[in-house]
Image (cartoon, coloured by chain):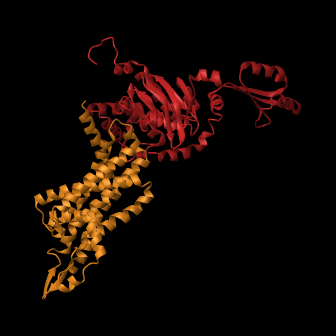
Amino acid sequence: MRGAGPRLTNGERSEVSSDAIVLEGISHRYGGRLALDNVSLSVPQGHSMALLGPNGAGKSTLMNIMCTVLRPAAGSAILAGHDIRRQSADARSQIGVVFQEDTLDDRLSAWENLEFHGLVYGMDKPARVRRIEEMLALVELTEWAENPVRTFSGGMKRRLEIARALMHEPRILILDEPTVGLDAQTRGKIWSYLVQQRRERNLTVFVSTHYIEEAESCEAICVIDQGRVQAVGAPETLKAQYGTSLIRCLPRDAGIRRRLLEKWPGAQQLSGDRLGITVDDGTSIDAFLGEFGSSLKEIQIDEPSLETVFLALTGRELRERDEVKPNARGKRNKRL
Amino acid sequence: MSKFSTLRRGIYAVWLREIMRSFRDRGQLIGGVSRPIIWLLILGIGLNPYFRGEIYGEVRFVIPFTYLQFLFPAVIVLNIMYTSILFAVSMIWDREFGFLREVLVSPMPRWAVLFGKILGGSTVATMHGLLVLILARFADVTLGWDQVALALVLMFLLSFGLTSFGVILASRVRSFEGFGVFSNTIILPLYFCSSSVFPLDPSLTRTQAAATYPEWLTLLVQINPITYAVDAMRGALISYSQFDPLLGPGIIAAGAVLFFAIALVDFQRQ
């Protein structure tokens, strides 16, 4: 790498590339079951991407490959310019990982957990002390530095894990459902740390989540199902492309209700005699209003949302997955 | 920042965490202290008078030591066995509660993670062996510094081998419940079949020689590797060996290398 000649060697080319994460043709199978089928993705440096997908979609397999715990059967993954196969130690030093489950040592204090992390990443004493102080301040745990993690609440533990993942100044932060089981206020707080770090440090964030508002605040969303990437794009683009509107209406009488059902046999029966009609674009809404606008007691139109995008792409609702979560957590703990 | 200092810091961190955890785990400490007291002060003193017989009207020990002296080196091995093999619990804990994942996504190579962990576990086990060694005076064992140094080296090697063995068990045991059974079906049988509480040859008089141990028991004792560890400790502490004095240390060292190698293969595969 001597001299700054115009010719680029292989190593330099990957450094120059502005994409922090490049996945190409990743496939993986467990036994005979194909968990990931030819997944390709790229995330530019400083951008954020949310991974959305129902259970069993291959989401955790992909997350495990991204954080270098699992070797893909086929395909290549390049993180911050380092191939995870050939330069795994270099790739690992450039990523910070926040796992879905707690991975703190609860018998050690907050400070000791961070100190351990710093040592494992080979940071020297002054750097460790400086970064621990900075990180504790960032996640507002400075006063709790000496307390054992055992005594922390769920939200405090999550914050400490994020502090830990950022401590060695990684270029990529990978988070696997980082806010599951936390209340809305804590979720908001954690998200604000991430936004701040992304802005200040040009951090690339890759996060799997099933909270719509979190996915929406990312620059790009990747919807994955049955091991395949179903769609990638900015939230607005996806909504425009796959989103549908839902008309909720309450007909004035039974006759109108019957006529409505004849015209839209697919209408859903909602609570309180209301009907839900799915339409894809503005013209259908106009047509509906033109015909029935005056014979309704009540009408509400739900704009295209990521929920409807998700439904259209995977045939499943995002919300119902909340209830399955405790089992999924138990299952995942067993994997390593 | 050199590669070596990165590696050294990583191993140090993993090692230090094991030490800190063991000091904060009251149960483990209490076990480490109470076990030798029960074995030495109660069993040892209680059986002391029965360890001798009469020849031509003269009372002699079966071997030229009191029972307490005979038992003392074995109790060190016992304390090390408990702490080392139960180290598997720490491994299972890390695996089940996710802490292992945090280390596995770090740039630290896997062998170094395992080496640090086993080094930490064997340091703790050696310290638990040292707790017994402090009681030497109560067992009428007088020690020179050279003997203490030799014993410490052997204790550390034994701890290293047995801790690796615990790690091998941990990678084959799926739950905590399974492990309680393991400890009682492995540690105590190995201990009792290691010529720890009785000598291999109980004969003092001709009448006693006629009533030797059954063959199966002698065989069990002879194929048990712990027998040779106990023998090595006796050689170092009371200068009494039932086998070739080099056999014990040799088996301890070979065990340390072999078990670490197997543990490493298991860990790389996980």
Quarter assignment of residue A135:
top left
- Relative placement, left or right, of B33 versus A257 is left
**For the point 52% across and 23% down, which residue is it?**
A219
Quarter assignment of residue B14:
top left
- Relative placement, left or right, of A3 versus B182 is left
The colour with which the image depicts chain A is red
Which residue occupies the foreground of this view, A304 or A67? A67
| Chain drawn orange in the picture | B
Q: Is residue B158 above or below residue A156?
A: below
- Relative placement, left or right, of A246 versus A12 is right
Residue A155 x, y percent position in the rendering: 48, 39
Can residue B87 be seen in the rendering of this structure?
no
Residue B264 x, y percent position in the rendering: 32, 47
**For the point 29% across and 60% down, which residue is it?**
B81
The quadrant in which the N terminus of chain B is found is top left
Which residue occupies the foreground of this view, B83 or B134? B83
Residue B47 x, y percent position in the rendering: 24, 77
Residue A255 x, y percent position in the rendering: 89, 31
**For the point 34% across and 55% down, which residue is it?**
B166
- Relative placement, left or right, of B259 versus B234 is right
The quadrant in which the C terminus of chain B is found is top left
Can residue B173 be seen in the rendering of this structure?
yes
**For the point 16% across and 61% down, which residue is it?**
B246
Q: Is residue A189 above or below residue B216?
A: above
Q: How many marks?
A: 0
Farthest residue, direction top: A6
Farthest residue, direction bottom: B57
Farthest residue, direction right: A255
